[in-house]
Image (cartoon, coloured by chain):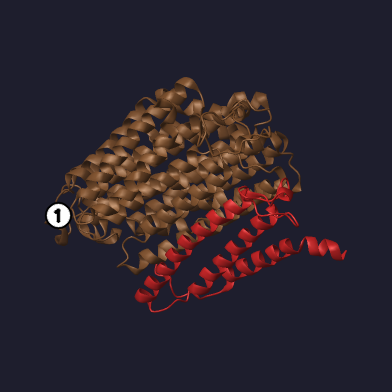
Chain colours: A red, B brown
Amino acid sequence: MNNVILVNFPFIVVALLLAVGFYTIGFKRNLIKVVIGIEILEGAVNLFLIALGYVKGAYAPIYTMAPKEAVNNMVLPTPQALTLTSIVIGVAVSALMLAFAVNIYEHYGTLDVTKVRRLKG
Amino acid sequence: MIEHLPALMIAVPLFGAFIAPLLKKKGSAPAVWAIIITTVTLGIGLLLVKEVLAQGMMVYVFGADRPTLVLPSGYRVPVRIIFEVDAIGAFMALSATLMSFIGALYSYSHVRNETGLEKYYALLLLLEVGILGMVLTGDLFNLFVFLEIAGIAGSALVGFRNYRGEASEAGIKYLIVSAVASLMVLFSIGLLYGQYGNLNMAYLSTQISFNTVDMIALGILFASFAMKCGSVPTHHWVPDAYTEVPSGINPTLLVATYASLYALFRVSFSLFGKVTMNMSSLGWIMSILGVLTMFIGVTMALVQKDVKRLMSYHAISQTGYMLLGVGVGLAVLNDPAKLAAFGRDAMAGGIFHIINHIIYKSLLLMTAGALFYVTGTRNLNEMGGLARKMPYTTIAFIVGAAAISGIPPFNGFASKFLIYETSYQLSPIFAVFAMVTSVLTLASFVKVFASAFLGPPVKKYEEVREVPRSMVVAMLILAALCILFGLFPNVVLDKLVYPAVDALLKLSSYQTWGGLP
């Protein structure tokens, strides 16, 4: 029983982070907090990808200069490449979102999403 | 040369996008540069369509000569980045290149007085790259990357007029929606990768066994792509984004939306195509979402005073037609008799409606942009009597309005008629809703025409003249396409649309991409 929880611990954390992220996006009124919520979601998805490719006690997936015992005992490299790409994209998204938030604060004088509502109808 | 066309489709606009910021202090040089690059891409797109229609599906592998190469250990799965271009991908790519060209042409005069134009054109070309990547790729992770590129470039363009607070508001709404949707796409890609250890769509579709985790992945993918294409429960971002974006970007942004729709079709027909038994319920969900989308969109449009916002709500409503058409086809996918009787025609109607809608909705949004250009307002109640001052815009508007309402000699009729006929055979209620929506569409466009173009001339606008020539040319090209597609629908259907439908239906030809078992 204990072992099941330990093995699946990263996935439990992923589920918790997803819940926290969606809660933050849905129920917080401050725009910066909404941006943080999206960052939490992104962290959850990245952790999920890394946890998928993890092999317990295995070596880093670098072929050059790898020791003999690392053959056929490496962490999956594809999820790590995917996660790197996803982190880079995430930086661009959060930078753009924060830029929008700054611009909204300049024009509306508030970051409260219930008051930033000039577009409606 | 010919075999490198799929890579060139991405490389040329990407090159253009990174050169554009260098032309900062050169007057109208970025605009000319963007027009040149989009023209070249349009040429490559035409060549690609010709090649795909003549030779069948094209498979392009990055970093290898042919897709059949395997790992040194003999492990036979596709590991490289593979572009798979079949008829529907080529069809979407042609729409994207054509609309980027029209958008760049229109922007030449429309945004001339803004600052930061080199960034504007760089983002326009990046948006084109995102769309082309999404529709050409055969790899799930690449799909996610290009989805994000299109999302970031699109929302930066929505917020382009950053001296208006509303633009930033619409931009952040669009960005939050696309960030959440694409993160959920990445999550379900992770679910599929964890089970099958591969990212290639064609390979995955041979492996899928449709267990519980697959069903969760399908649900998340369906919801995310439906969110990105503006289907009803999550349509709130569409009117804001389409209203605030400069009119020259509207055509490209429309295609970006329908690239998500393409991804939705690709997921339901190709990725999960093997499990046909369970797909008919998905088809019914898609059709019902389509009917709700078209009806709610048009009722929201009727009450609008802002001309561009009214047209944006119509964009939601027209997306419903495409969902309905293809959803009817998906619902009868596992019933060959019904599929031959009306399912294939329904899908043809839905896919034909994509290109028709892109053409006439871009035309209408451009006329709205032209009205804004000369009057400085988008409020219908402040306009009047502009028909005599702006004859070309008026003609373009009449053609577009007739086409969107489905009046016979124009292109909207051809695809809508296919959808009425075929959805009636699945359930008469669908057809009734589709026709009522068309009538309401006509009603709201009569309102726009009467208040903006007819009526007594307003004193404030006595001095206004027709918009500059490049805007007129862009609008007239689209109006001509509206009439041509309406007069000869059979040519387009036979050459472009039915091959695209068959590409979606024939799963086995999509899976045989390199001779691997």
Q: At 20% across and 52% down in the image, what residue appears?
A: B385
Q: Is residue B327 left or right of residue A69?
A: left
Q: At 14% across and 51% down in the image, what residue appears?
A: B465
How many other residues sit within 10 Å of disc 1, few (<14), some (14-19) or many (≥20)? few
Residue closer to the observer: A114 or B31: B31
Q: Mark 1 points at which residue?
A: B464
The part of the image, by quadrant, that contains residue A18 is: bottom right
Total count of labels: 1
Q: Position of residue B390 (x, y in %)?
A: 18, 47
Asked which secondary structure carries label 1, the reply is: loop
User: Is residue B6 in sight in this rendering?
Assistant: yes
Question: Given the current orientation, which residue lies at the most extreme top position?
Answer: B54
Q: Position of residue B95 (x, y in %)?
A: 40, 37
Q: At 35% across and 74% down in the image, what residue appears?
A: A107
Residue closer to the observer: B468 or B150: B150
User: Is residue A120 in sight in this rendering?
Assistant: no
The part of the image, by quadrant, that contains residue B6 is: top left
Question: Given the current orientation, which residue lies at the most extreme bottom position?
Answer: A109
Residue closer to the observer: B187 or B283: B187
Q: Position of residue B28 (x, y in %)?
A: 19, 50
Rendered-image quadrant of the N terminus of chain B: top left
Question: Given the current orientation, which residue lies at the most extreme right position?
Answer: A1
Q: In this view, does B196 lie to the left or right of B57?
A: right
Q: Is residue B460 left or right of residue B295?
A: left
Q: Which amino acid does label 1 sit on?
A: Val
Residue B10 vertical position relative to residue A93 in the rendered view, above or below:
above
Query: Chain under label 1?
Result: B
Q: Where is residue B248 in the image (x, y as percent from the top left)?
A: 30, 49
Rendered-image quadrant of the C terminus of chain B: top right
